Image: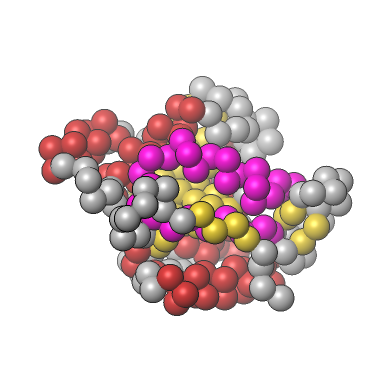
Amino acid sequence: MPLSSLTLPPSEPGTAPEALVVILHGWGSNAEDIAGLVPSLSALKHCWVNVPNGPLAHPYNPVGHMWYDLEDPQWPGLEASKTQLAEHLTQLSQSKGIPFSNLFILGFSQGGAMALDLGLSLAGAGIGVFSGYLHPALLAAAPLGTPMPPILLIHGLDDGIVPFRAAEQTRQFLESCGAAFDFHALSMGHEITPEALGVANRWLLQHWGSQDISQENRQENRQENRQENR
């Protein structure tokens, strides 16, 4: 069954879309909720943005969705969701005429884990992970030995839902694979703060940018966003 989703056109009329950005919500959230972040990301103003709902209903939130069942240690539904999401991305790419090489996948929490898992198998433009984690099967596959897109990791030092050690594990995995990534440890909990959005916006501008951004401003964004991996 196709995934339900919200599609947001470029916010500046008369501009040719440069990229396709897909944003994946966390466990128990939905497309409408996480789509509220889009106005805070000015880098997306010339992009098509798609926000899908996870295929499974959440057991406690009547309007919530999930990508798989976190309460079962076997995580039932994960592989089926990955297949559905891959089909969804292919359909989006074809319908918008935007290749995977111009695709960014962003995700929060469970959505961040999905973005990382699926994004590493695609020749995309980039992967952004907010408060995410690694799926065990992906961890067991390291090193992948294939080129990877740029990756952004943002995680709260005080995250009580997905502990910071999950971000450290992801960092170590990416290092073992030789991936190019930016790692940002922020003073926050399990959330996406204005500071986190600012980091993500600069990263998007660095790795893609908009048509009206001068070369000088692109260089400034690169300098602001540069941070040593740790």
Question: Nearest the camera: 224 or 91?
Answer: 91
Question: Nearest the camera: 127 or 167?
Answer: 127
Question: Nearest the camera: 129 or 49?
Answer: 49
Query: Is residue 41 positioned above or below 2 on the image?
Result: above
- Res. 195 visible in picture: yes
Tell me which segment is drawn in magenta. 27-54
Q: Residue furthest left?
A: 216
Task: Return the x and y of residue 67 as percentages of the image width and height.
Answer: 69, 59
The residue lying at 57 percent from left, 71 percent from top is: 88
In this picture the colour scheme is secondary structure
Query: Is residue 183 positioned above or below 112 on the image?
Result: above
Query: Is residue 219 positioned above or below 208 on the image?
Result: above
Task: Return the x and y of residue 3 as percentages of the image width and height.
Answer: 66, 67
The residue lying at 52 percent from left, 64 percent from top is: 118
Task: Return the x and y of residue 1 as percentages of the image width and height.
Answer: 71, 76
Question: Nearest the camera: 76 or 194?
Answer: 194
Magenta stretch: residue 38 in it? yes
Picture quarter containing residue 68? Answer: bottom right
Query: Is residue 178 positioned above or below 155 on the image?
Result: below
Magenta stretch: residue 116 in it? no
The residue lying at 57 percent from left, 75 percent from top is: 87
- Which quadrant of the rendered structure holds the C terminus? top left
The residue lying at 47 percent from left, 75 percent from top is: 95
- Res. 70 visible in picture: no
On screen, residue 178 versus residue 168, left or right, reads left
On screen, residue 50 versus residue 41, left or right, reads right
Task: Return the x and y of residue 211 as percentages of the image width and height.
Answer: 23, 51
On screen, residue 50 versus residue 62, left or right, reads left
Q: Residue furthest front?
A: 14
